[in-house]
Amino acid sequence: MLTIDRVSLKLPMYASWWKREWATCLDELSLCFSAGEVQAVVGASGAGKSLLAYAIMGLLPASAQLSGQLHYQGQPLDKTRQRQLRGRVLALIPQSLNALDPLVRTQRQVAWAGQRAGHSPAAAWHSAQQALNHYQLDLRAQQAYAHELSGGMARRVLTAMAHVSQAQLVIADEPTVGLDPEQRQRVLDALRDLADQGKAVILITHDLRHALPIADRVTIMRDGKQVETATASAFQGIGSLLTQAYSQRLWLALPDNNFSTTALGTVPEMQQETNVA
């Protein structure tokens, strides 16, 4: 459905008031995302995960230098096509809950997403109610303002907005941050449900452990580079099915593996990056 071919991204940085330099944030990424799958993109903070989402959606700042090719359904995904598809065929579930309008009740916000996708006001209102019911948000939550929702409820509202948009590609950026186990599982189940409906779901997360049960494939990123893409089932045992040592180290460092250091040796950066668990 979506193909990324040798995509690189540079953003400006200023070493001083008069000297501009360019930081490479994505480096020759080549990825493929398929319908009916959840593909988790996993990495520590600064790995470039969210910037990848913004590149796909066409939401990068004007100063960004993007190279390489993006194709959706076999056709180039350029800026014009991104504008045409964004909010209709391409949907982003953002990391920040500030994406919800604080002055508008839940159902109306979800209905607006349906109208942007081309539904009539009446059809959008009905679809919003159905989607909110589907994601286990009761009448009280449907009539609530954003500040009256828990974190998990707010993220399910954002998922419902992607649902009514009829988007075929859904990107969820760190959708489980700050949630308790029950709310986190509800959000992850909602993403799995979208994939089971035939959509392509990109789950951007630092949380490898909780992504694995719903993911079909996992891409490990580090410093803007793709380390490895593997099936979720490859993350088992001592990681012998993984081809890259870094992926194996991340897997072995998870709490479920007793923070194993058997295959790690002395790797200074791992002390910081085990928080990918």
Image (cartoon, grey):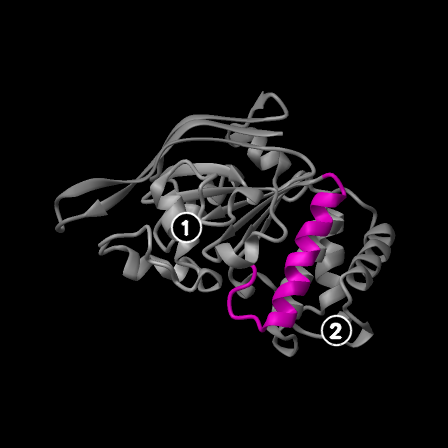
Q: Is residue 60 visible?
A: no
- Residue 158 place in picture, x, y as percent: 65, 59
- Residue 205 place in picture, x, y as percent: 49, 54
Which label number is shown at residue 141?
A: 2
Tell me where the magenta segment starts and ends, as one range: 175-198
Q: Nearer the viewer, residue 254 or 67?
A: 254
Q: Looking at the picture, which amino acid does disc 2 mark?
A: Ala
- Residue 52 place in picture, x, y as percent: 45, 42
Residue at x-position 39% and y-position 58%:
253
* Comes first in the chain, label 2 or label 1: 1
Location of residue 148 (image quadrant): bottom right
Q: Looking at the picture, which amino acid does disc 1 mark?
A: Gly
| In magenta stretch: residue 182 | yes
Between marks 2 and 1, how big is the CA–CA gap? 33 Å
| In magenta stretch: residue 164 | no
- Residue 68 place in picture, x, y as percent: 41, 25
As drawn, is 47 to the left or to the right of 106?
A: left
Residue at x-position 37% and y-position 55%:
45
Tag 2's secondary structure?
A: helix
Tag 1's secondary structure?
A: loop
Q: Nearer the viewer, residue 201 or 233?
A: 233
Which label number is shown at residue 43?
A: 1
Q: Nearer the viewer, residue 261 or 189?
A: 261
As drawn, is 19 to the left or to the right of 261?
A: left
Q: Using the image, determine if residue 66 lies above or below residue 171.
A: above
Counting the numbered discs, the total is 2
